[in-house]
Amino acid sequence: MSDLAAHPHAPGVVPLLLARDVLYATRLDARIREASKAARSLDDVLRALVRDAATKSGRLPEATFHDKVAAEIGARGKEDFDAFVVRPTKTAMPGDSLGACFELGEASYDIVYAGLDVAATRDARRVVGFDSNGPTSKASSKAGVRATDTVVSIEDVLDAATPITVEVERDRKMVKIAFEPKSRVRRGPSFRRRAGLSDDACRKLALRK
């Protein structure tokens, strides 16, 4: 993870880091609920960290987080942290990670990817994190975004089906480019509500009290 974090503007780095963090947090929350028989959750660990931070100056060391997790579920917390965050491996999520109301299945996902770092590009007014093979550069054969463009405006990435418009200054001319921020489709795990369960039924099945 440290290698990726050192290059936040490289194509695809930020979404990958966020995905790893979300998977780890989901697994950790399920572990804590299971160990405490639904009496505690990841929220309790985070609240304890906030209290510690309020009474101490400076940033809390990473070890503080691991110590609090270990107090809840033992060594499994650090093992999951290494598997999801530090040295990621292809680790399957337990089917009950989101509680008894949801079941694990498989679905198709659009890989939403602009081919550049949208936020950094907007702030710098130049192309940041440019991928010459990404969807941005392939917007058209004549007017795709180029790494040397001066960026006047760029829209946020909403979803793979919503075209993004970029306005750039090139050769003393204003050029507008529209493209779909989608690179490919992949199959992967997906959680969905179990068929036939109402909101009230889900509340009763929820692990969180």
Image: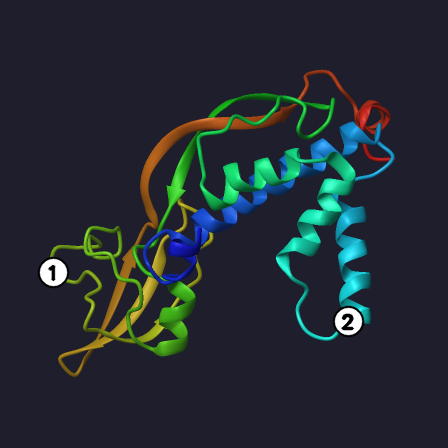
What secondary structure is marked by label 1? Answer: loop
Q: Is residue 192 left or right of residue 196?
A: left
Q: Nearer the viewer, residue 47 or 179?
A: 47
- Up the image or down, 122 lies above or below 26; here it is below
Q: Which residue is mark 2?
A: 56
Q: Which residue is mark 1?
A: 142
Numbered circles on residues, count: 2
| Residue at point 41%, 76% (across, down) | 123
Picture coordinates of residue 68, whole percent (x, y): 75, 48
| Residue at point 48%, 45% (across, down) | 86
Q: Is residue 40 left or right of residue 131?
A: right
Picture coordinates of residue 104, whole percent (x, y): 59, 22
| Residue at point 39%, 72% (across, down) | 122
User: Quarter-wise, where is residue 132 in the image?
Assistant: bottom left
Q: Amino acid at mark 1?
A: Lys
**First-in-chain label (1 vs 2):** 2
Residue 127: which disc?
Answer: none
User: Quarter-wise, where is residue 105 in the image?
Assistant: top right
